[in-house]
Amino acid sequence: MDKRTFIKTSALAGAGLLAAGQGKASARSFLAMKDLFPDKLVNDQGVYILPPLDYPYNALEPHIDEQTLHIHHDKHHAGYVRGLNKATQALADAVEKEDFALVKHWERQLAFTGAGHFLHSIYWKNMSPHQSTPSGDLKKYITRDFGSLDKLVTYFSAATKSVEGSGWGILAWQPVAGKLVVLQAEKHQNLSQWLSIPILVCDVWEHAYYLKYQNKRAEYIRNFFDVVNWDDVGERLDLLLGRTK
């Protein structure tokens, strides 16, 4: 079994498990996930690739500094991509040889590097040098589920600031319940909530902010909201709701 076949087989199996029994809305949300990534994350050979930024490295100044973006995107995110390809190939080889002595190790690497790749790919799109505000269904669900945008920001910021060690703050759509939820993630993969689909993520690994903010995580999170691309967040929710423009 080659890498491309392995990826496709795994993806189809996952789609079947997640869609089964969850109702039309849940299945539609899951199938829309491929449209949440306008940049290709996998090439035609099934190899994971690093998506480019939509803006220059200095475009988010002064909130996110140029040097941090260079290191974060070109070094850290690229490292997750390499690790994900390595783990994927190792597991494909294990299937071919029926040798699963290291399956626990490579499955952990697959979860860790895969979560890093996919969350970072959302993170870059979630930011923009152009200011925007929530509108449409995003605004409606924020108001319904949190009371107001200010309350969401306060809640999200508190949850993200208190992530233990390295991790993420996540605003996700939960299709089974039909609501927005705020989640924490330790590392990338721990404390995940199944069937909740991230639409806004804030990276609080120290490499995301330490050069500029040192240990002032709360200040970084406050300034993160000055570059949030609410248009992108809203488009992600619209896709999961089955809306098209």
Image (tube, grey):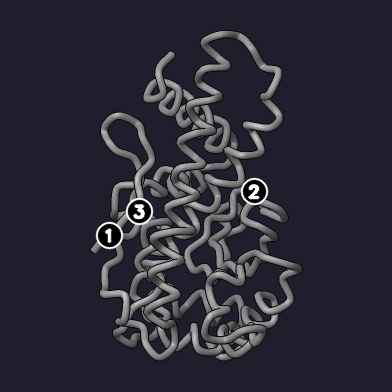
Mark 2 or mark 1, earlier in chain: 2
Question: Label 1 belongs to which residue?
Answer: 244
Residue at 54 percent across and 82 percent down: it is 143
Badge 3 marks a residue whose secondary structure is: loop
Q: Are marks 2 and 1 in contact (CB under 8 Å)?
A: no
Residue toward you, 78 or 15: 78
* Image coordinates for residue 238, horizontal then vertical, percent: 37, 63
Q: Amino acid at mark 2?
A: Trp
Give the residue type that dot 1 points to.
Answer: Thr
- Crowd band around label 3 with a 10 angstrom C-alpha radius: few (<14), some (14–19), many (20+): some
Q: Quadrant of the N terminus?
A: top left
Looking at the image, which residue sits at the far top?
Answer: 97
Residue 194: image tag:
2
Question: Mark 1 or 3 closer to N-term?
Answer: 3
At horizontal 54% and vertical 61% (from top left) the residue drawn is 173
Instruction: Report the disc number at residue 37.
Output: 3
Q: Is residue 217 left or right of residue 88?
A: right
Query: What amino acid type is highlighted by mark number 3?
Result: Phe
Q: Residues within 10 Å of mark 1 (few under 14, many from 20)?
A: few
Between circles 1 and 3, the one closer to the viewer is: 3
Residues tagged 2 and 3 counted as in contact (Cβ below 8 A)? no
Whether residues under marks 1 and 3 lie with C-beta atoms below 8 angstroms apart, the answer is: no
Considering depth in this image, is 93 or 118 the residue closer to the camera?
93
Q: Is residue 210 above or below residue 61?
A: above
